[in-house]
Image: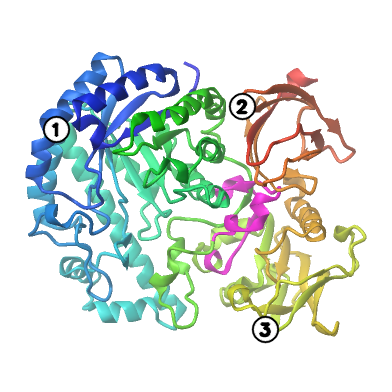
Amino acid sequence: MEKKSNITYRIPPAFWKSPGRFQALLEELKKQRSGFDDVALFCGFTHSIRQLDTIRGEQPRLRAALAELRRNGIPCGINLLCTVGHHPENLPDIPGGMQPFTSLDGRTCRGSVCPRDQRFRNDYLRGLLTVLCECSPDFLWLDDDIRFYGHGDLKLVCFCDRCMAEFNQLHHTAFSRKTLAAAFGSPDPQKSILWRRRWLEFSGTALAGLFAYVEQIVHSINPDIELGAMDAGMRVGDSAGLDVLAKALSGPGARPVRWRPGGGAYTDRAFDDFLIKAHCIGCEAAWLPDSVHNVQAEVENFNYQRLAKSVHATCFEGAVYMAAGLTGCAWNVLDAEDPLAVYQPLLKELTALRPFLDLQAKWAEIRPVGIYHGWVPELPAGALPSPGASWEDTLWQWPNPHFSGLFTAGFPPAYRPEDAAVTILTSQSARILPEPVLLEIFRRGVYCPADALPVLEARGLGDLTGFRIAERIEDDAIEEFVEHPFHQGAAGFRRDCRQSFPWGHESAYSLVPVVDGTETLARLVNYQGKESAACSLGISRNRLGGRVAAAGYYPLRDLQFASKLNSMKNLFQWLAGSAGLAEIATYHRIALWVRRRKPEGETAVQLVNASQDPAREAVLRLPDGSVNAEWQDWRGGKRELTGMAKADGSIHFSLPEMPPWSVALLTTKSVVSGQ
């Protein structure tokens, strides 16, 4: 059967609780039937756990609504909001007698509950799941947000007395919350990382245990109910592998599992937020096991004010998430109270978008290749707090190079190390990645921000980078290109990142070689033109055969000057070496994801014009492949393209004009058929 996208509508309770509103919605869904596969009815619409009696009172109507959908040929299930609770909302309906999530300083979040609490598991959750299973849903999706970070105003959780006791018993320790916080922030990096790792593993075990418990209950009642899970934040509060979590939810019968990586981006005030979220959830999709085929992006227009996110932005968002590697979309776009007519134009456009999403889905399960940013499930353990901050303060905004300007201006991401032509190795990754992984990374191309150099030096790998830090510079440093082929005649260009501005301040570094044969690409000068550092950006080859760039001045920010971006493209092509790297070869703000199908040799490139300007005369460079390609845009346009083969073996495609904030798919023909 031909692969298609997985599309679900999530329906607020106000629609299914009212027979009249539900009938109107049902008629609209029948008109839009080609645009979706199934419907999820929300159980609850506030972000805290609710009284079981409240849910039991809703059960007859929920069961009837599901039955009515099935009679009309619409597969349907339940979206459980919430499973463990998220925010202290709807306080009168919060049940008592259970242990809420607890922070390191002992505060709690009402409306949430620790999944280790036995009263929650045995008395509440078992009863809740039984009530929902009796409604005979096709699937049951656990929501919102099932994680160990960011509930109410709490950061890292859960440090309740039970969790502390079980952790101490497991590790033969006697930590209090205060002494555990001190261990997390120990000045000894080995000690701090040890206890952070152990805590993240401990939380991951609880999450996997919760999923396994839900699976056992649900499938003992009805083995045909398909289970799904929603999370958010790329696992910053635990280090459970996504394969472990999916297996727990699938159970011993290896039943199909749905997944929905979550996140914000609720309005269209900042379109870049969609790209940032795309990288987060695309990375998570790439780490899910191959057995999980239904991975839906959450497109959430919370709190559902129709004018707060345009039709264009909603469609664009779904297509961008598909480009990043999701297999479908969960549309959460309907308000609970406004007339349905307000939303009909949006629903119509989402239906019209479906054929393009289906095209994207044909490539979704092939992981993208390009530049890897070092993410692994245990990466949060390596976060380094700024002065005066704690470890948990760093977790939500952990350093992610994909948030940088590189990935909106022509550089393709990879989300796993085995898919990388080049790796961006941050200090956080350098602290956490095992030595065998680091050695493998250094056999290929590495772009190494300078603050990772002392971390690698302390691990005995400093010689692999080619440079060490000679001096830190805090004021008025400006990057200046020196003569080098990568700059293509732009020697003397200065990139001023305004180091003195407090909201953009970063340390600058003077670098000195530690091996022979290094080359300098840039130095630092001050506002008077006086040299502050003879080298701030340099390249070398290491003893493993890899190529390395050490970058000491704003390595992941403010990179979209034309001269800098052109130089970076030459640098990353050199770092990629024989592995090759696709790119937008012209000066355009275009994001792209590149996938290759073997052994046929076909390549798919998903492109996003991430600009308010039309992208005219853009050129896509592929490292190799066929000169024959097909172009399809998200509005149905289609063209045949013929690329130009270059002397270095690369293929250059002149792209059709891309409107502002639009998405397109370029697929090359197989190399054999293209000859």
Q: Nearer the viewer, mark 2 or mark 3?
A: 2
Quarter containing the C terminus: top right
Q: Nearer the viewer, residue 620 or 595?
A: 620
Quick check: 189 above or below 14?
Answer: below
Residue under the image location 41 percent in, 73 percent down: 391
**Which region of the structure is painted magenta?**
400-429
Q: Can the viewer see residue 255 in this picture?
A: no
Percent of width and height locating residue 41: 26, 33
Q: Image check: 208 left or right of 396?
A: left
Q: Label 2's element? A: loop
Q: Label 1's element? A: helix
* Three-letter code, disc 2: Arg
Q: Nearer the viewer, mark 3 or mark 1?
A: 3
* Three-letter code, disc 3: Arg
Image mark for residue 635 = 2
Q: Label 3's element? A: strand
* Residues at discs 3 and 1 in contact (Cβ within 8 Å): no
**Occupied quadrant, residue 492:** bottom right
Q: Which residue is mark 1?
A: 220
Q: Indicate which disc, 2 or 3, sits on the residue closer to the N terminus.
A: 3
Q: Indicate which disc, 1 or 2, sits on the residue closer to the N terminus.
A: 1
Q: Image check: 81 left or right of 345?
A: left
Q: Can the viewer see residue 275 in this picture?
A: yes
Q: Which residue is mark 3?
A: 472
Q: Nearer the viewer, residue 517 or 382?
A: 382
Residue under the image location 10 percent in, 54 percent down: 95
Residue under the image location 79 percent in, 45 percent down: 585
Percent of width and height locating residue 142: 27, 42
Distance between the alpha carbons at the discs numbered 3 and 1: 62 Å
Percent of width and height locating residue 655: 77, 33
